[in-house]
Image (cartoon, rainbow, N blue to C red):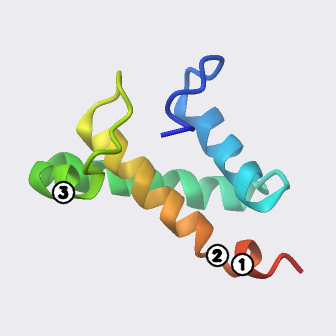
Amino acid sequence: KRILTLPEVRDDASRLEIAWQLCLARKPSEEERRELTGLWQANRDWYADHPLEAKKLIGEFAAEGSTTDQNAAWIATARILINLDEFITRE
């Protein structure tokens, strides 16, 4: 929800980079950026095709001004980021 409601950020590429930096305290490499973008897009496509699953995932945490599939894709992507070993161990 935080990523979707940042007033100064208007595009998903910037949101992905900010989410990465918030979780891992560094900028993503080009390969990491490509992987994360592909992952986010796959999540968005899947939730666009499965609106009931998207609504179930979002629950009461929907960010206003974003579509259901966008909200669900961001939740799914954020969950993956916070489950990365680098996020958990901070070595």
- In the image, what residue occupies the spot 69% across and 53% down? 20
User: Label for residue 84?
Assistant: 2
Q: Is residue 91 above or below residue 40?
A: below
CA gap between label 2 and label 1 equals 6 Å
How packed mark 1 is, by other alpha carbons closer than 10 Å (few <14, some 14-19, many 20 or more), is few
Q: Quadrant of residue 65?
A: top left
Q: Residue furthest front?
A: 60
- In the image, what residue occupies the spot 18% across and 49% down? 55
- In the image, what residue occupies the spot 25% across and 51% down? 59
Q: Position of residue 31 (x, y in %)?
A: 70, 61
Q: Residue furthest left?
A: 52
Which SS class for mark 2?
loop
Residue type highlighted by circle 1: Ile
Q: Position of residue 30 (x, y in %)?
A: 75, 54
The residue where tag 3 is placed is 56
The residue where tag 1 is placed is 88
CA gap between label 3 and label 1 equals 26 Å
